[in-house]
Image (cartoon, rainbow, N blue to C red):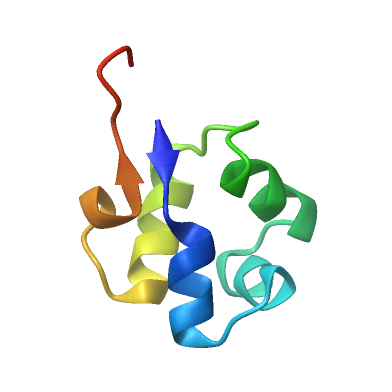
Amino acid sequence: MKNNIKVQRAINGLTQEDLSIKVSVSRQTINAIETNKYIPSTVLALKIAKVFKKPVEEIFILEKND
């Protein structure tokens, strides 16, 4: 699964730290999600999508081999 969190953060002028505070996780967790080293829980994915006011499917994209 890939994501466009980094792009959405740039559009919204948020740092990893800003986003982490908004969704109550560490900055390292946001970094791990952005670099595809960690797949977020459904709840966390929904929280991130809510911050960006986008459907979760626009933030997280399933790949063919997922």
Expressed as whole percent of the image width and height from the top left, the position of residue 35 reads: 63, 41
Expressed as whole percent of the image width and height from the top left, the position of residue 24 reads: 64, 63
Out of 44 and 57, give the one closest to the viewer: 57
In the picture shown, does residue 65 fall above or below 13? above
Residue 55's image quarter?
bottom left
Expressed as whole percent of the image width and height from the top left, the position of residue 42 reads: 39, 40
Tell me the quarter of the image containing the C terminus. Answer: top left
Q: Residue furthest bottom?
A: 13
In the picture shown, does residue 18 fall above or below 37? below
In-image side of 9 versus 63 (left or right): right
Seen at 44% across and 82% down, the residue is: 11
In-image side of 12 versus 57 (left or right): right
Seen at 54% across and 62% down, the residue is: 6
Q: Residue furthest top?
A: 65
In-image side of 59 versus 19 (left or right): left
Residue 15's image quarter?
bottom right
Tell me the quarter of the image containing the N terminus. Answer: top left
Expressed as whole percent of the image width and height from the top left, the position of residue 57 reads: 22, 49
In the picture shown, does residue 37 fall above or below 11? above
